[in-house]
Each structure stands twice: as C-alpha cells, then as structure tokens.
Amino acid sequence: MRRIEMPCVEHGRLGGGGLQFERVQQREQDRPVGLEEGLIQTHWPDLLRTAISIREGRLSSVTLLRRLGVNSRKNRLYRAFRELGRVIRTITILQFLSEPELREQIDVMTNKVESFHNFSDWLSFGADLIGHNDPVQQEKIVKFNELLANIVIYSNACDITVAANQLAAEGYPVDPEDLATVSPYITENIRRFGDYVLDLTPPESEPDTRLDLVPGALFPPSA
C-alpha cells in the first residue's frame, strides 16, 4: 500500500494579488491517508464494466448504490471505487489550486447550476421534501421536476428570442453581449398555481428559435 505524504495543510483566501495561502498547523484528522493502489489495479476491469453498464443503461445508478450500500466496507468493489475517487479528487484539488482559469470556469458553472436548482425548486411547489422512500419514485419526481423546468426555460428562451428580433426589426440596437446576460430563469410570467394543460397537438407554426439581430443579414427572407 503506497502512502501519499501531505506536507502540510494550507488554507487559501483571495487577496489583491490573487489567491494567497496561509500555513496552519496540521491537525489530527489531517494526517496522511493511505491509498490502496492495488485495489484499483486489481478491480480496474470491474470498474470499467460497471461504468459502461451505467452509460449503456443496463445498470441504473440507484441499483448500484443500493448494492454498494450493503456491507460497503467489506465490498472490495466499493473500496476500489472509493480509492479511485480519492485519486480523482486529489488531482482535481491540485488543478483547482494551480489553475486560475479553472477556478473561474468552476465558479461560472456553479452559479449556473445553482440558478437552475433555484428555478426548479420554485416550480416544485407543495413540499420541500420528497415524501417517498422508494428510490425509483424519488428518481421519477426529480426527473419530472427537471423536465418541467426545462420546458419553462425553453418557453422563456423563445419569448426572449422573439422580443430581441422584434426590437432589431424596429431599428433598435441589440448588443449580443448584453443579450447574453439575460437569464431564461424568469418567474414573473409563470402562473405557478394555474391550470396545467397537456396538449399533445403539434403547434401550427414552429417557434422562433433563431436570433436575427440585423434583419436579413443572417436569415434573408425567402422569395
């Protein structure tokens, strides 16, 4: 078993000159953690087969977690996944500390994910907690909520596109950089407690999903 030595624990903070680190005393829980490298090598084919099964839809993540949750500490596949996760987590932390561009990208993506979650939580009215212990039912509720959120986001994006094209057609300048700051997570135009009507009839006309900020430049009118 190879032991990874961590020389010390450092805490980072943002200052005027960028990311600065302050050296602190090593705590009891920060002692070096052993990495069972042999488990990863021995069970590497099993890890690949499990990942491919999930990707191909032959094994659900719920079923895998349920299997690994039984006597997990005695399950060698669970321990192999745990060691692999430690390796990936260590590499990610080192990249995060050494690459400012990666930190900025992670911050942007985190804000987007949090905005989507806040929007989907706003649509999921009725209870803050899922009242089912069945993992299958829990997964259905989460997926249906995300489906509803994506439908509303698509509708808002279409409305924004129509409004921007109309302003451009009337001669108002529309800056693409300004338009990029407009979020589709709009709630003022949604009647959350209104009637939900499921109409499977195809619309008479396709929604306008193309931006034409300079009329006729990107999509000339057909003769």
Image: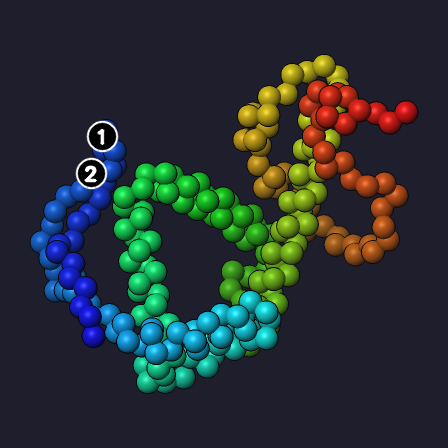
User: Tag on residue 17?
Assistant: 1
Q: Which amino acid does the dot numbered 1 rest on?
A: Gly
Residue displayed at 85% across by 46% down: 203
* Closer to the camera in the image, 142 or 73: 73
Q: Is residue 198 above or below residue 85?
A: above
Residue displayed at 34% across by 78% down: 42
Q: Is residue 144 above or below residue 167?
A: below
Q: Is residue 49 above or below residue 28?
A: below
Report the residue marked by disc 2. Answer: 20
Q: Secondary structure at mark 2?
A: strand
Q: Secondary structure at mark 1?
A: loop
Where residue 129 sits in the image (x, y, percent)?
A: 51, 64
Residue displayed at 39% across by 74% down: 44
Q: Hey, which residue is sitting farthest left in the picture?
A: 25
User: Do the residues bearing badges 1 and 2 touch, measured as CB atoms within 8 Å?
Assistant: yes
Asked where in the image residue 205 lies, by quadrant, the reply is top right
From this viewpoint, is residue 151 visible?
A: yes
* Closer to the camera in the image, 95 or 192: 95
Where residue 90 sits in the image (x, y, percent)?
A: 29, 58
Name the quadrant of the N terminus. bottom left
User: Tag on residue 63?
Assistant: none
From this viewpoint, is residue 125 visible?
A: no
Q: Which amino acid does the dot numbered 2 rest on?
A: Gln
- The 10 Å Cα crowd at callout 1, few under 14, some 14 to 19, many 20 or more, is few
Q: Hey, which residue is sitting farthest top in the picture?
A: 171
Where residue 35 sits in the image (x, y, percent)?
A: 24, 70
Where residue 17 sits in the image (x, y, percent)?
A: 22, 30
Name the quadrant of the C terminus. top right
* Closer to the camera in the image, 22 or 53: 53
Residue displayed at 30% across by 52% down: 93
